[in-house]
Amino acid sequence: MAWRVLLAVASGAYADLALERELRRLPLAPQDRGLATELAYGAIRQRRLLDAWLDLLGKVPAAQQPPPLRWLLHLGLYQLLFFQRVPASAAVSTAVELAKRDGLARLAPVVNGLLRAFLRRTAPLPLPADPAAAFALRHSLPDWLAADLLAWLPLEQADAFGQAANQAPPLDLRVNVLRSSREAVLAAFTAAGVPAEPLVDLPAGLTLTARSSDLRALPGYSEGHWCVQDRAAQTIAPLLDAQPGERILDACAAPGGKSTHIAELIGDVGTVVAVDRSSGRLQRVRDNAERLGLHTIKPLQGDAAALGVAQAADLEAALGANLAAAPFDRVLLDAPCSGLGTLARHADARWRLTPAAIDTLVELQQSLLAGVAPLLRPGGRLVYATCTVHPRENQQQIAAFLAAHPGWQLHLEQQLWPQPQGGDGFYAAVLQAP
Ligand SMILES: C[S@@+](CC[C@H](N)C(=O)[O-])C[C@H]1O[C@@H](n2cnc3c(N)ncnc32)[C@H](O)[C@@H]1O
């Protein structure tokens, strides 16, 4: 299954969608599901490092091998390099058997020979002399990103970023305090044999300390006692300081992690207009709000960059008020971004992203900021957030906004870096309208 995911991703599929498709075709027991996920995502993250091993040990460079062979070797090598609990002999023989069974019979000896050559080797992978190239290879990152990281961070912190980008992310939850409490959810998990711990500094946060593949089967899911949200993402909605009864716009809302958090923080009293461009993703906001029993969330499909102009009537209908007389008290712009803070979560993202794509995102973010700013009441609060660490999408974006919008004030700016022990990278700026 992991092999098919690697093949699909190499032909352009998104890793999470490819894996979901495979899991639908062949439902697996929970442990096997976890193993397939870890294998597929791990080998995709480590693509560059695994290619370097193939280049070193094989007769044909990785990039010139037939793709099915290259990805099968990646899976075998990945297990030999990173999996303690799969015996080396099992990893090798499974790869050889797969080759024989699935159209690579002629190449099975190559699979066997190369994986065994790796096992015989005692020396580590030779690294390039150039520090940036060595850093890129050690953490399996593209050259442009490695160069950027080394320009932004001292080596030790850049290494921590690389480690964070290459691990299976933890599974954090946020308790819906309107329906339950952290203590009650933890007690229910303990009773069901699901190990979990509270997250420090996050009043509603907890983390699962063992892998759990079917979240919907956990206690309290269908009752809306909690939802999945990374610990860093849980710091964003509180920055709005929203109060019960207020009008709040979540301009890029789907799938609703932060809209639902806002609704919980205001005791589900007020109005949270949840806008997203994608109708499919907006349905997930509706589903999440319904499961969590939140009534203040009003989903609205639209382009947040032109909302006040093109869709003023829709916006007023969702808000239940005239926009000129009663604009928003708070606006959250959790903007589409390069996602450099969530590379561990999106195994294939680093191989998709390009500096040119970041240019396009910077323009989009700029138009979104300019589009939502006029919807705020005088003195109202705007929180701009991204799950990236790129200064052009973050600090520089906000500096440009402030330069173009006289009278606005920056109250707080925070950059959370992705952490090797868990937690996505998140940026937030808290702005006040004149
Ligand atoms: C970072 S995600 C939002 C995550 C969400 N705030 C949460 O916490 O669950 C960015 C979202 O922006 C949406 N989006 C992108 N361009 C948009 C636009 N011009 N107007 C409205 N939404 C847009 C995307 O569909 C995507 O759902």
Image: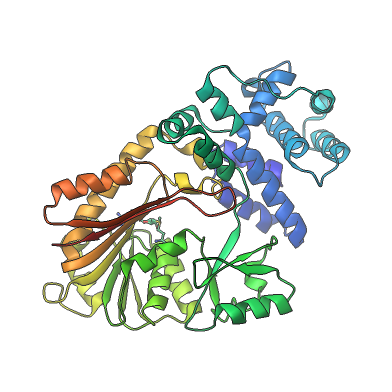
Counting from the top left corner in percent of width and height, residue 315 is at: 23, 70
Above or below, 268 against 328 in this view is: below
Q: In which quarter of the image is residue 68?
A: top right
The residue under the point 60% across, 80% down is 183
On the question of residue 300 being in view, the answer is: no
Counting from the top left corner in percent of width and height, residue 405 is at: 14, 52
- Determine whether, in the image, residue 110 is placed left or right of residue 363: right
Q: Where the C terminus falls, by quadrant?
A: bottom left
Above or below, 233 against 162 in this view is: below
Counting from the top left corner in percent of width and height, residue 147 is at: 45, 28
Image coloring type:
rainbow
Task: Compare residues 425 and 219 and report the one nearer the observer.
Answer: 425
Above or below, 193 against 211 in this view is: below
- Determine whether, in the image, residue 381 is placed left or right of residue 289: left
- Determine whether, in the image, residue 41 is placed left or right of residue 285: right
The residue under the point 44% across, 36% down is 153
Q: How many marks?
A: 0
Q: In which quarter of the image is ligand 1?
A: bottom left
On the question of residue 44 being in view, the answer is: yes
Above or below, 271 against 281 in this view is: below
The residue under the point 30% across, 81% down is 270
Counting from the top left corner in percent of width and height, residue 22 is at: 66, 52
